[in-house]
Image (cartoon, rainbow, N blue to C red):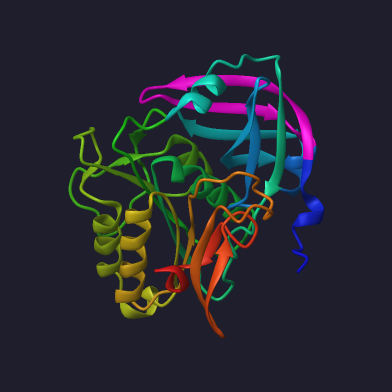
């Protein structure tokens, strides 16, 4: 079956504009990729060649994409030989990038209080989705990000008040503050201003501080490691809230040919094996957990 997003996938020799290192072996890569920037949606990703001598590509979520400038920002963490090679790439070099790939998040026009939950390298799609909401009227998103390594930005005390937050939980994301979107950070590492606990703990306190009418306006979006997504899905079920999750899986081709990233998904006709790369990476949480 043809997928509507497949006609927009392109391959570009993108120029590396900047490549910034952050603590915890994390990097933010900015590339000039006009075709990808023009069609990228929150939740989509790219498949890039980490080094000319290594043909196997790596999938990386898109953190920001500006169709006017052609700039695309990618956040990744060094975890193996491939991403180590990628971390050595320099501004001015060109890198082969395929994208944007995947079905992204769907905005629910009936719910005005989106809750965006990201963990680790699952943070970028939440940043992208938050920026998308700045272009829409009538929505009031709240972003919760968690990490067990230092965050890939300099956290700052949030000036935006959020009901239900524990005393001292004030650390936020500067970029989101600029957009007027409240955020809070969680970790078990004792970082200043962060909630000492899991993202779902903080989300639960936020939900419990609402009255029933406001809670019915909430929809949850999430990306992160599998255990975190499972916990988010359970949270959504406990509060009877819709929830979309973006899955992270190892991929070879990333265009649906190899079926190496399949997951079991419940459909109207029963269980089915779906490919994360082209059928996802975003799924309704209740269908995969």
Q: Which residue is drawn at 23% across and 33% down?
A: 191
In the rendered image, the vertical position of residue 285 relative to residue 191, given as above or below: below
Furthest toward the bottom, the residue is: 269
141 relative position to 91: left or right: left
In the rendered image, the vertical position of residue 189 relative to residue 250, given as above or below: above
Residue 281 covered by magenta stretch:
no
x, y (%) of residue 62?
Answer: 59, 42
Q: Residue at x 57, y 34 (%)?
A: 74
Quarter holding residue 229: bottom left
Q: Residue at x 24, y 54 (%)?
A: 165
x, y (%) of residue 269?
Answer: 56, 85
39 relative position to 248: left or right: right
175 relative position to 132: left or right: left
For residue 270, say whether it is visible: yes
Q: Give the range drawn in magenta.
A: 11-34
Q: Quadrant of the C terminus?
A: bottom left
Residue 23 covered by magenta stretch:
yes
Quarter holding residue 273: bottom right
Front residue (pair 237, 288) = 288
x, y (%) of residue 193?
Answer: 24, 37
Front residue (pair 179, 149) = 149
Main SS, magenta region, reads strand
118 relative position to 17: left or right: left
For residue 67, say whether it is visible: no
**What is the count of numbered marks?**
0
x, y (%) of residue 49?
Answer: 65, 30
Q: In which quarter of the image is the N terminus?
A: bottom right
In the rendered image, the vertical position of residue 90 relative to residue 258, given as above or below: above
């Amino acid at each position: 079956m043809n997928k509507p997003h497949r006609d927009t996938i392109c391959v570009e020799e993108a120029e590396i504009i900047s490549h910034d290192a952050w603590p915890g072996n994390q990097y933010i890569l900015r590339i000039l990729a006009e075709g990808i920037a023009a069609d990228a949606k929150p939740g989509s990703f790219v498949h890039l060649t980490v080094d000319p001598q290594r043909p196997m590509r790596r999938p990386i979520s898109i953190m920001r994409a500006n169709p006017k400038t052609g700039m695309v920002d990618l956040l990744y963490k060094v975890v193996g030989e491939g991403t180590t090679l990628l971390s050595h790439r320099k501004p001015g070099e060109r890198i082969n990038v395929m994208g944007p790939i995947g079905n992204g998040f769907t905005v629910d026009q009936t719910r005005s209080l989106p809750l965006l939950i990201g963990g680790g390298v699952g943070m970028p799609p939440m940043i992208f989705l938050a920026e998308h909401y700045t272009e829409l009227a009538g929505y009031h998103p709240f972003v919760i990000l968690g990490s067990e390594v230092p965050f890939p930005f300099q956290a700052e005390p949030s000036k935006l008040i959020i009901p239900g937050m524990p005393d001292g939980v004030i650390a936020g994301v500067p970029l989101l503050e600029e957009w007027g979107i409240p955020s809070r950070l969680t970790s078990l590492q004792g970082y200043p201003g962060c909630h000492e606990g899991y993202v779902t703990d903080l989300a639960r306190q936020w939900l419990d501080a609402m009255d029933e009418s406001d809670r019915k306006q909430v929809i949850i979006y999430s990306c992160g490691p599998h255990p975190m997504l499972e916990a988010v899905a359970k949270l959504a079920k406990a509060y009877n809230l819709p929830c979309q999750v973006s899955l992270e899986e190892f991929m070879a081709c990333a265009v649906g040919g190899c079926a190496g990233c399949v997951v079991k998904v419940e459909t109207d006709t029963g269980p089915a094996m779906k490919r994360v790369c082209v059928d996802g990476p975003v799924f309704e949480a209740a269908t995969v957990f």
